[in-house]
Amino acid sequence: MPGGSVAARLLGVVASAQRASRADAVLELVDSIPPGRVMTYGDVAQHLGIPSARVVGQVLSSRGGSVAWHRVVLSTGAVAAHLAARQLSLLAREGVEVRRGRVDLRRCRWRPASS
């Protein structure tokens, strides 16, 4: 059968739907982070049961422009180097205290209620 078997195509469709659903969940959670608070990429992944924080970064990189992407930081509290000026500016406007380029996660980390 040209283009692969029906089963293989169906598995591809299911995998694509799961990726889209996962991406939507990431965007929804990130958009719910309150102003003045942050989560790490790992926090988002763990809360959603996603096996890798990199997946969260990929979603925000490709589809995160419409949500509060700036409220997601590295596990050290640092921000992504290529976005540092913009991200730090947005966080400062929300009252997030940043010292030496890092957010104080003890003070600003947000942990959503378990779903």
Image (spheres, rainbow, N blue to C red):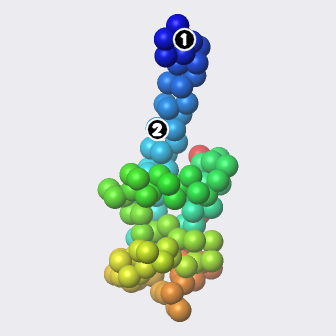
**With respect to residue 88, does 13 lie above or below?**
above
Residue 23: % across, % down: 48, 45
Q: Which mark is residue 6?
A: 1
Residue 7: % across, % down: 59, 14
Residue 70: % across, % down: 42, 69
Residue extending furthest front? 2
* Residue at (57% x, 71% y) in the render: 74
**With respect to residue 10, does 75 lie above or below?**
below
Picture quarter containing residue 109?
bottom right
* Residue at (41% x, 53% y) in the render: 62
* Residue at (57% x, 67% y) in the render: 40
Tell me if I can see residue 32 in this picture: no
Quote the CA–CA distance across marks 2 and 1: 21 Å
Q: Earlier in the sequence, mark 2 or mark 1?
A: 1
Residue matched to label 2: 20
Between tags 2 and 1, which lies in front?
1
Residue extending furthest bottom? 100
Tag 1's secondary structure? Answer: helix
